[in-house]
Amino acid sequence: MDILITIAIAAAGGLLAKKMKIPAGAMTGAMIFVVIFGLLTNRSSFPAEYKVYVQFFSGALIGVKLRKEDIIGLKTMVLPGVVQVLSMLALNLIFGLLMHYMGGLDIPTAFFSSAPAGMQDMALISADYGANPLYVSIIQMLRIVFIVSFMPTFYRMIIARTGRNTPQTQYQAAAVPETRQESALPKPVRLLLTIVVACAGGTLFRYLQIKSGALIGAIVATAILSIFTNLAYFPISIKTGTQICAGAYVGAQLKRETLSLLPGLIGPIMIMLVGMFVFVYVFGLIMQKVSHLDLLTSLLISTPGGMQEMSLMAQEFDCDTPKVVVMHVLRIMIVIFLFPTMIGMLEHVLP
């Protein structure tokens, strides 16, 4: 019952925010309403195992947008990929050092809290390195909540002041027009096929124990269906529902008991939140220069949010979603495989 109520509250908030034309409204409104509901009643619930189904649908939503020309265009993203890895390394080092020396956290907890990866992944890995997994979870969770809640408005403010700053080679202008014939199969059949393919791909990647496997596998499987056939189909109504569920999941992680730990984490949290604006803006401009993408797409690539949240935002803002997805997949893989070893080394070097 708590789960159903949480989803109903999320739907009300998401649809209201979408109607009010709030940036990324379906996800943002759902999250805010669920946070308020959870703090007032302590009954918000969206179990982690249900997140897998949201990831299946998110992956399908992203995968159906991929076309053969998008894959060919990714060869131009080698240099931006290098820039992103270096920028995320800089974020982890700078924020980690500030959280350690100014925020009072021990070295492992500081660096795992500032690592730009998923909350669950970092919390689980951090415990093996002597960090405080609860502190890591709270700071990582607030990072995602902050990004979903405030970054869309931040993007709008930047674009309103500077313009989208889109080069002549922008992806919309360069895109190959859709020439494939529409499938003769009814849309409900194509939708069912797309969902089955997405679930199968996500399940396979999870079975192979690939990090973020449900989402990545669903994207890969649905993209293959979209690239090589004309059968992939996913309507806009399900996109809104997926965003609402994603917002419900993020919002449900903030509980009353979490608030009791916040006073001791105010310093590290403020360092992260204030620094996030500067980091995203500076590296967004750098990413724009090296990638020749428009500014808004570059900002989304440079924002260290969850892959699911950033992919859905890219859809909402009509950005170059395939490149946003690929760049965030690269970021998460690098962070998960490289950063724990790096943090372990820093613990022995730093005073």
Image (cartoon, rainbow, N blue to C red):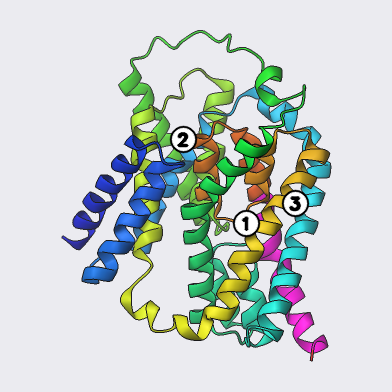
Tag 2: amino acid: Leu
Residue drawn at x 63%, y 32% as measured from the top left? 320
Is residue 211 placed above or below 167 in the rendered structure? below
Q: Work out whether mark 3 precedes mark 2 in sequence or the reverse, and give the earlier one.
A: 2
CA distance separating discs 2 and 1: 21 Å
Residue 312 numbered tag:
none
Q: In the picture, residue 192 is in which quadrant?
A: top left
Q: Position of residue 204 (x, y in %)?
A: 50, 48
Q: Work out whether mark 1 precedes mark 3 in sequence or the reverse, and give the earlier one.
A: 3
Tag 3: amino acid: Phe
Q: Position of residue 202 (x, y in %)?
A: 48, 47
Pointer 3: what residue?
Answer: 283
Residue drawn at x 35%, y 56% as measured from the top left? 32
Pointer 2: what residue?
Answer: 61
Quarter of the rendering occupied by the N terminus: bottom left
Front-most of residues 277 and 260: 277
Residue 189, visible in the rendered structure? yes
**Of circles 1 and 3, which is in front?**
3
Residue drawn at x 60%, y 36% as measured from the top left? 160
Element on which disc 3 rests = helix
Element on which disc 2 rests = helix
**How dense is the environment of label 1, judged by Cα within 10 Å: few (below 14), some, or many (20 and up)?**
many
**Of circles 3 and 2, which is in front?**
3
Pointer 1: what residue?
Answer: 304
Is residue 279 placed above or below 43 in the rendered structure? above
Q: Give the extent of the magenta segment.
A: 329-350
CA distance separating discs 3 and 2: 27 Å
Element on which disc 1 rests = loop
Magenta stretch secondary structure, dominant: helix
